[in-house]
């Protein structure tokens, strides 16, 4: 949201272009898209009410937040809109209107009224993954989806991480596979991270064997590992999108007799963390696999996965 201008002599206009390019890359593309979308919504709302979006008056932002809350928007969405308004103002050299007393007070009241608890999708725990795999069709699509489900689950990958894996990122070892993640949501600088996926105890649900089978049957030897398959069952060159992962998980959940509306692409990652916690895996080991830097999110998975472990109500003789 910044614009850089330098004098046009001595090739400085070229340097200015490079500076702007690096600024644009300081944030993930999805984050920038969210900022633009949120700002467009606020600016459109202001336009429809003949109000000035930038610099906005505190009363304008407060009224916008109250309107969003009144229309049933979740606290997380309203907070993101607030952040986008803040970014737009500071990037343009204006005071941050979101830090004014009126806006802060209204936002605090909204949070107390509608709550801030996030309603996430259900984690696909081990039993769910097994049910999904057992319901897959016996064709190339089924082979791909089996590998995608099992690798995504065992690696605790985000959707974007899963679809960006190339054959060149895989290293098959005696113990399993080492997957090198070149980029991730928490690694925008591209330092990379290695994730180990061990052989499973059962052939039908082994992520390593499933991935090997997919590569062999698809004939993929380089480039994107997970690719689209057309309606005729033919492999395509293009890499799967992260949205396709969510659709695959939902389709597989429905085929397994699960409530597809409760599952998403994130269910694979959340499912591994939750399943590991249910089986007493340490917090450190879970964080090593998921790549979480914050203990808060991992501990949420652990709390959910441990609800029935050493449960007080289980020992009172009911």
Image: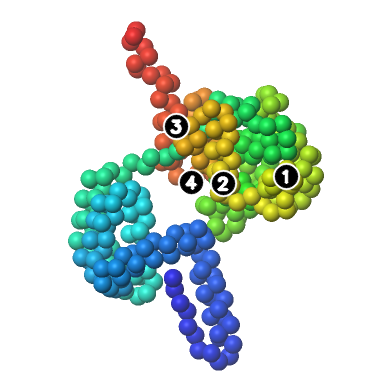
Residue nearest the observer in this picture, 288 or 302: 302
| Helix, strand or loop status at disc 3 | helix
Q: Position of residue 231 (x, y in %)?
A: 69, 45
Residue 221 seen in this snapshot: yes
Tell me the element at label 4.
Answer: loop
Residue at x 44%, y 32% (from the top left corner) = 302
| Distance from the alpha carbon under mark 4 to that under mark 1 | 43 Å
Residue at left 76%, top 36%?
213
The image position of residue 218, as x and y in percent, is 77, 43
Q: How much space separates mark 1 and mark 3, taking CA atoms?
A: 43 Å
Chain-order first, disc 1 or disc 3: 1
Residue at 77%, 46% in the rendered image: 220
Horizontal side, residue 70 vs residue 29: left or right: left
Label 2 residue SS: helix
Q: Earlier in the sequence, mark 4 or mark 1?
A: 1
How far is mark 2 from mark 4, CA to CA? 18 Å
Q: Which residue is mark 1?
A: 232
The answer to whether marks 2 and 3 mark residues whose Cβ atoms lie closer than 8 Å is no
In this view of the protein, which residue sits in the foreground, 117 or 131? Answer: 131
* Residue annotated with mark 4: 293
In the displayed image of the protein, which residue is found farthest to the front?
232
In the picture, which quadrant includes the N terminus?
Answer: bottom left
Residue 135, quarter of picture: top right
Q: Residues within 10 Å of mark 3 (few under 14, many from 20)?
A: many
Which label's residue is closer to the chain start, 2 or 3? Answer: 2
Residue tagged 3 = 302
Question: N-terminal of the two: label 4 or label 3?
Answer: 4
Question: x, y (%) of residue 89?
Answer: 34, 70
Could you say where residue 243 lies in the image, as x and y percent from the top left? 55, 49
> Visible in this render: residue 172?
no
Q: Are marks 1 and 2 in contact (CB under 8 Å)?
A: no
């Amino acid at each position: 949201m910044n614009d850089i201008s330098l004098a046009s002599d001595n090739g400085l206009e070229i340097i200015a272009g490079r500076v702007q390019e690096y600024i644009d890359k300081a944030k993930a593309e999805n984050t920038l898209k969210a900022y633009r979308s949120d700002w467009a919504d606020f600016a459109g709302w202001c336009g429809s009410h003949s109000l000035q979006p930038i610099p906005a008056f505190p009363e304008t932002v407060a009224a916008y937040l109250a309107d969003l809350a009144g229309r049933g928007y979740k606290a997380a969405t309203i907070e993101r809109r607030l952040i986008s308004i803040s970014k737009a103002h500071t990037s343009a050299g204006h005071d941050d209107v979101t830090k004014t007393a009126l806006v802060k007070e209204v936002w605090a009241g909204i949070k107390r009224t509608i709550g801030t608890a996030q309603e996430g999708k259900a984690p696909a725990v081990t039993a769910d993954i097994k049910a999904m795999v057992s319901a897959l069709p016996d064709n190339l699509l089924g082979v791909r989806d089996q590998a995608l489900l099992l690798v995504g689950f065992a690696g605790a990958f985000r959707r974007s991480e899963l679809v960006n894996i190339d054959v060149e990122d895989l290293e098959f070892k005696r113990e399993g596979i080492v997957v090198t993640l070149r980029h991730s949501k928490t690694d925008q600088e591209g330092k990379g991270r290695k994730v180990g996926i061990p052989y499973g105890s059962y052939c039908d649900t082994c992520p390593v064997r499933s991935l090997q089978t997919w590569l062999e049957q698809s004939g993929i030897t380089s480039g994107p590992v997970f690719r689209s398959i057309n309606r005729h069952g033919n492999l395509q060159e293009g890499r799967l999108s992260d949205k396709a992962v969510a659709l695959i998980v939902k389709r597989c959940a429905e085929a397994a007799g699960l409530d597809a509306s409760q599952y998403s692409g994130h269910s694979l990652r959340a499912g591994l963390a939750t399943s590991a916690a249910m089986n007493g895996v340490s917090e450190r080991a879970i964080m090593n696999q998921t790549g979480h830097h914050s203990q808060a999110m991992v501990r949420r998975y652990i709390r959910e996965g441990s609800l029935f472990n050493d449960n007080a109500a289980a020992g009172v003789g009911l």
